[in-house]
Amino acid sequence: MGIKFIVDNNVGKLVKWLRIMGYDTLFFGGSSDSGMIAIALNEDRVILTRDTQIMKRRVVTSGRLKVVLIKSDEPEQQMHQVITALNMDCEYGPCTICLECNQPLMERSKQQVKDRVPPYVFQTQNQYMECPACHRIYWRGTHWQAMTKKMKNFMKG
Ligand SMILES: [Zn+2]
């Protein structure tokens, strides 16, 4: 089981990056810290936020709830901080989570997606995944490769 996250709206850019890496990540769009904390405790999620007030909460100071207080404004620096703080694997599960819905993707055969992907994709890709919620089809094509490469590069440097 990997780490699961809930991301505060002040660091919302982290959502997509974490899902690209394959981490189950909820976006919290509300304004109530208590609401976010309740979800985190219920679902065993790590909170990512820039809100220093949350750090003073008893559930956090006692260590019951894990929070990473994000320091930078820059999404790449933010990702760097999270990955380092939690000792995460950049290639944990690329192409396993829907980037829009946060649902685990299901494997699909080439024949099952035949009429649902562009012809050039069908010719060049053999592995496909489908989101059970929004039915978007994913494949480990250039988009994914470019994102993963970018992530590895900034982790190096
Ligand atoms: Zn989806």
Image (cartoon, rainbow, N blue to C red):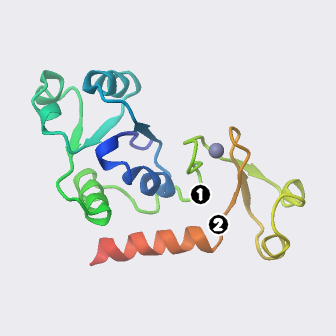
Q: Earlier in the sequence, mark 2 or mark 1?
A: 1
Q: Is residue 15 left or right of residue 108?
A: left
Position of 105 relative to 140 (above/below): above
Q: With 105 as the anchor, is 8 left or right in this view?
A: left
Q: Residue at left 87%, top 53%?
A: 112
The quarter of the rendered structure image containing the N terminus is top left
- CB atoms of marks 2 and 1 within 8 Å: yes
Q: Is residue 8 above or below residue 117?
A: above
Residue 110: x, y in percent? 84, 61
* Dot 2 amino acid type: Arg
Q: Amino acid at mark 1?
A: Cys
- Where is residue 91 drawn, in percent x and y? 46, 62
- Residue behind mark 2: 140
| Above or below, 73 relative to 44 | below
Question: What residue occupies the far front of the structure in this picture?
Answer: 31
Q: Secondary structure at mark 2?
A: loop
Q: In which quadrant will I find the C terminus?
A: bottom left
The residue at which mark 1 appears reads as: 95
Some atom of ligand 1 lies within 8 Å of the CB belonging to the residue at label 1: no
- Comparing 142 with 110, the one in front is 142
Residue at 43% across / 44% down in the picture? 2
Judged from the image, the quadrant occupied by ligand 1 is top right
Q: Residues within 10 Å of mark 2 (few under 14, many from 20)?
A: some
Number of marks? 2
